[in-house]
Amino acid sequence: MSVERENFNRWYKRPLGNLYADNDAGFPILLITLPLLERFLREKTGVYEDKLTPEFYREIERIFPALRTKNPWPGSGSETTAQRFWSVFRNGLCHQATLRELPDIFFAGLNNEAPDVRTDGLSFVVSPVKFSRRVIEEIEADFNMFLGKSSRRHSLPQIF
């Protein structure tokens, strides 16, 4: 096993596995998992340091097919469900440690009994454990992509 894979297991996968048993750990699970997903998808879609692209969101939709719904919200313009999801969960949690409220979202919440992601067009429900496991599975299937060799400003930490 490579040093990078060993570090990934020690720093991310194993601690997440420990959190999965705690029903109250949904926010910490997502706070770790969403940046891992972002790193992986930025590398995979070639976004790197730039603004997120339609390709980035199509990759989220590939991983989480429930997010393929297009424009379910009145007045949402060309914004996709995947973009709304990213705004509510990733931007909300990583910037304010809570889910971001949008005026036309009826409900956004966490429930480990739900599928990885569920949306009915006006609400989002995420199982933090299932979501996280799916992201880890995706990263492990293409670990070289996660390493981010093209992201020179975001190399993975090393132990010295």
Image: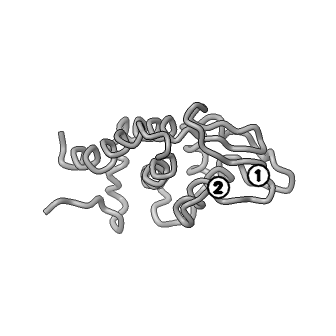
* Foreground of the two, 143 or 106: 106
Question: Residue 81, relative to residue 96: is it above or below?
Answer: above
Q: Is residue 109 left or right of residue 103?
A: left
Give yes or no for contact between labels 2 and 1 (Cβ–Cβ under 8 Å): yes
On the image, which quarter does residue 126 sit in? top right
Q: State how many labels appear.
A: 2
Residue 90 seen in this snapshot: yes
Q: Look at 47% across and 66% down and name the residue there.
A: 49
Q: Look at 85% across and 56% down and name the residue there.
A: 75
Q: Is residue 134 left or right of residue 52?
A: left
Q: Quadrant of the N terminus?
A: top left
Q: Look at 70% across and 59% down and name the residue there.
A: 101
* Foreground of the two, 98 or 24: 24
Q: Mark 1 falls on what kind of element?
A: loop
Q: Which residue is mark 2?
A: 88
Percent across and percent down for residue 9 are 27, 43
Quick one: which residue is furthest to the bottom in this view? 153
Q: Which residue is mark 1?
A: 105
Residue kind at label 1, given as amino acid type: Ile
Residue 62 seen in this snapshot: no
Q: Quadrant of the C terminus?
A: bottom left
Marks 2/1: CA–CA distance:
9 Å
* Foreground of the two, 35 or 154: 35
Residue kind at label 2, given as amino acid type: Val
